[in-house]
Amino acid sequence: MSLAIHQDDADILLKQKNILNEDNLEKYRVAGQITQTGLQYLISLINNSYHLKTTAKISVQDLCLLSDSFLFKLLNKQYVNKVIEKGISHPTTINVNELINGFAPEIDDEREFYFKEGDVVTLSLGVQIDGYTSQVSHTIVIYPTENNKPTGPLLGNNADAICACHIAIESVIALLGCSLNPEKLPQNLQSSKITGSLIRNLVDSIADQFNCIVLPGSKIRRIRRFLAGQAEGIVAERDFKGVVWDESHQEIRLLKQGNTTQDLIVSEKPQSTNNSSAVPNDEFFIEPGEVYQIDLKMSGLSNLNEIGIITTDEIDQFSGKNNKQDFNSKSSIFIRDFAITHQLKLKTARKMLGEVDKKFSVYPFKLDYIGNELIDNEKSQQEINEQIAKLKQSMKSNRLGASELINRHLIKSKPIQITKFVPLKEILLTSNPTGKHGIDLSKPVLPGMEIPLPNIGISSIKLKSLLKTGFNISNVRESTTIIINNNNNNEVLRLNGGEQTANINWIHSNYKLNQDLQDTINYLIQLTKDKRFGINLKTINPYKLKQQNASVESMQID
Amino acid sequence: MVFTCNTCNLQFNNADDQRSHMKSEWHRYNLKRRVAQLPPINEEMFNEKVANASVQDAAKETTKQETKKDQRRKQKEEILKQKRAILEQAKKAMLKEQENLAEEPKADQEIQNITKQVECLELTPEQEEEKLLKEKLSNKTEIPPTTCLFAHRKYNHNFQSIDENIDHMFKSHGLYIPEPNYLVDKTGLIEYLAEKIGFGFCIACNYQGRNTDAAREHMLNKRHMRIPYETEDEKLEISKFYDFSSTYNDEEEEGDEVDWEDVEEGEEVDSEEDLPPVEKDAILQDGDDLILPSGAIVGHRSNARYYRQNLPPDRILTEGQGTVIAAETRHMLTLKDRKEIAEQKRTWKKSKKMEDLNDRRAAKFINNQPHYRDQLLQ
């Protein structure tokens, strides 16, 4: 196998194609618009069926399918025959409560996945046009309703987390926007340039004020054409630039809190396993002309009275069969690994691989995308049901092909993850004879972050074994893509999210920001309010849509 | 028994005469003539020549006292003298003209001169080329196809018909027209050659003379009175006067008789579709391959093993895949060295063998008795 890209080609692909000219900006803009519209559509579907009750309750698998087919329909209208590669960059996932990643059940899943009142539901989706990617996540709350109005605000740890997440996202956008005119940076940050550590400190302090934890897997990273973090944990991306949170940062926080650092620290200092540019570190500067993905996941700790580490656990079809855990699900999102070639035996597998290479390229996909048209949202309910039945049929042969592809590592499944709280007491009581060399290969982590707790010396395998002593904890997630556009009219372009589509729900948090931090954040957010104040922030609007399934507008929740 | 000398066309009565003749200067001279393909001369002529030559030699000897340098100097001086004389004449003429002409026309002349110069300056390279071409064209002499191409005008070799002309040129100048059986346009060919000579070209070596006569002189001296017909280009040059279509069918059949293998006809035909349609019934040979009029390529049996290979097509990456591969830093992308793996396997095998041998050797000394009794203690 001789898969190597010539240096000249690599320069073109990695550098020149990422220069923000009018053409590329337009592609980003269209991608952003599609995600905005998709998110609005998905939220209106949920509101209609769970809050307004104008339609029957729609299950999670149906919501995923409807949203994906809606995105495909919008994509089909844009850049027809003008770009070779366009599509969904992040299949719609709907993660409820403790689920954090990758839950997008297939349409032939017989179980009933419905939301309950009081659930926090994270909706994530993304599209790419010619590799220019826009990805959005937003957490909504399912309320008990009375006269089409929620009976009260959400309280408790989830409310704290939603609040912290929202404030963190808004202030980070402002902070990144400051790179266009650094003289506007707040004085108390004591920095003339925006570094990774500055961003981390800001987010961590906001999370601390709301008694929240920034969960492992949260990141604020630069994205490039075709490199939008869709294959994290599989591809070790060159020149990674971004702030990444994992368990080790919680560890550092705990060590600071306890003031017992000297006792706990094992002689060896944390060190990364290699020093390539693929390993994230905070020593970088935000530069104008870059595109950033801000993806923050948080969990509130207010109902816990012990300290511990929040980590993620993978769920597969076998989990829950050996102990009390009762939830299991097959992972349904796959991504092609282009580093691997193999002569396949099954005809269905070969056919499927050809189609995957052609249709989805380097982005993740679901099995129901393959080989058939997705359903048409505008048709009547009966026709949709017929189409769904057809889809279920074709899923069987797709499964067969996919199983060989997975066995040969040609495609990798993206795991479904849940967040778990493991008490620190349990971690400290265990022995760890393998040292930090027991690496859990099934867990996708960025290079250099294989050891979750380097100071205490707990390997990922050990932490996995400790998960049974922990318990599930719900999380919330907000993410958005922004462009720091330094062309002619210095502006910050927010591709998705914002007040129009990802409006924050009615929540109430008991915590308040302290005066110092509040001043800084108020100042930062003030900057974005008008371009005269410093930052010209523009948010992409969704398409104006007719409501298809229900004529009622989505519910106003204050 | 007759003794002869074939070189000088002589007969001798005895061997001694013949031998003495063979040693003579006359015979040697005739030998040299024979080498130069000239007829022999008789003794009288030879003696005359010798006498002439000796006179010339004597004259040369007298003049030889002057060196070549001196000769050249003298020549130069003479030329200079002539030039001076011409210049003086010209001066005189000019002075006379100046006296005769009024001032105005003079000015006019100057202006004209200047404009001419300007014109010369304004000429672009292209225009200059055109000018040269025009000059060349004006230089052309028409040679009708019924006239001998090679003889000077003064001989006036005109004939009634082209055939007669060709016959003449064949006999007296040795012009052979290649492939006469397939020659369709005889007049055209002769006209083409006549045009070429008319412009002052040699037909055999593309020598370019100043005019037609120079070309003819060249061809006569160099014996270049022939049509070159060896390389592909030379054949193509006069190919429009020929028609070989009657031969094609035979060759194709021949091709079938020899061992040819069909090389993936379908694919080749596909690739040919974009090209302009091949001239019908054309067969081109490219190394061991034959390209048929249909566009299919027929390969030779000796290469069959290569044609039979079923290689996978090259992987064409899309831009996205290329970007991801370019940004990839995993090290597993390098291919494992097969030799290294084979070497490793051999080592494993060897060590396993040694282990087995050791085990077997050790097994000999294992005591399998259920109740061990020491022999010495009995």
Image: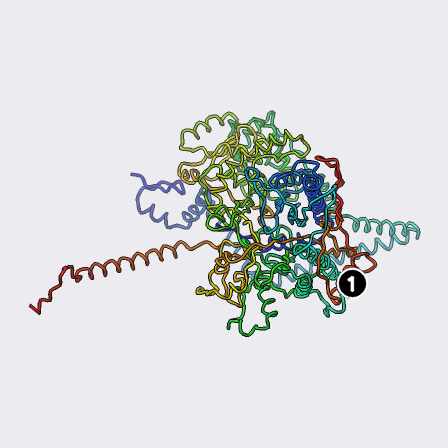
**Looking at the rendering, which quadrant does residue B352 occupy?**
bottom left
The residue that mark 1 highlights is: A523
Q: Nearer the viewer, residue A336 or B187?
A: A336
Q: Is residue A16 above or below residue A394?
A: below
Residue at image coords 68%, 48%: A140
Q: Position of residue A182 (x, y in %)?
A: 75, 64
Q: Is residue B366 above or below residue B204?
A: below
Q: Position of residue B119 (x, y in %)?
A: 81, 48
- Under circle 1, the secondary element is helix
Q: Is residue A545 above or below residue A274?
A: above
Chain holding disc 1: A
Kindly identify the amino acid type of the residue bearing the numbered disc 1.
Tyr
Q: Nearer the viewer, residue A68 or B73?
A: A68
Other residues around mark 1 within 10 Å, as few (<14) / some (14–19) / many (≥20): some
Scheme of colours in the image:
rainbow
Looking at the image, can residue A481 be seen?
yes
Residue at image coords 73%, 66%: A514
Q: Position of residue A538 (x, y in %)?
A: 77, 52
Q: Nearer the viewer, residue A175 or B184?
A: A175
Q: Number of labelled discs?
A: 1
| Furthest residue toward bottom | A262
Q: Position of residue A220 (x, y in %)?
A: 65, 58
In the displayed structure image, the side of residue B240 where residue A39 appears, left or right: right
Looking at the image, can residue B220 be seen?
no
Q: Nearer the viewer, residue B150 or A530?
A: A530
